[in-house]
Amino acid sequence: LMHSGGCDILFANADEAAALVSGIAAPPASTAAVSTQAMDGCDAALRLAQHVPVVVVTDGSRGSYISAMGELHVIPPCWMPHGPIDTCGA
């Protein structure tokens, strides 16, 4: 995940992002292990942003999180009057 010669943009759902964060060593000041179950998409986006310049994390009904250029943008979900027909995003 390190930027130098690695990844410029990361797009993942919240579970994928939390799994990626669990594979990154915790900062020296922190002795607590990262729990992927307790981490939401926002936390994962913030942690991954330390390693990747642009991070997009989708988090279901909670919306999406975009981290770029040192800022975190929270994008709320948008629901149509009858709800989504296909939620796969394809």
Image (cartoon, rainbow, N blue to C red):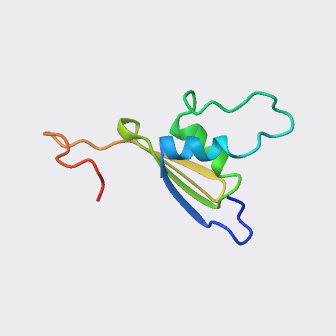
Expressed as whole percent of the image width and height from the top left, the position of residue 15 reads 49, 41
Expressed as whole percent of the image width and height from the top left, the position of residue 88 reads 29, 51
Residue lying at 61% horizontally and 67% vertically, measured from the top left? 8
Q: In which quarter of the image is the C terminus?
A: bottom left
Query: Residue 86 vs residue 72: left or right?
Result: left
For the residue pair 4 and 80, the one nearer the viewer reads as: 4
Residue lying at 49% horizontally and 42% vertically, measured from the top left? 14
Q: Residue furthest left?
A: 82
Is residue 61 shown above or below 4?
A: above
Is residue 28 shown above or below 33?
A: below
Query: Residue 26 vs residue 48: left or right?
Result: right
Expressed as whole percent of the image width and height from the top left, the position of residue 89 reads 30, 54
| Number of numbered discs visible in the structure rendering | 0
Residue lying at 71% horizontally and 46% vertically, measured from the top left? 24
Expressed as whole percent of the image width and height from the top left, the position of residue 12 reads 49, 52
Query: Residue 12 vs residue 54: left or right?
Result: left
Q: Which residue lies furthest to the right in this view?
A: 28
For the residue pair 82 and 71, the one nearer the viewer reads as: 82
Q: In which quarter of the image is the N terminus?
A: bottom right
Is residue 38 shown above or below 84?
A: above
Residue lying at 67% horizontally and 68% vertically, measured from the top left? 6
Query: Residue 22 vs residue 29: left or right?
Result: left
Q: In which quarter of the image is residue 36?
A: top right
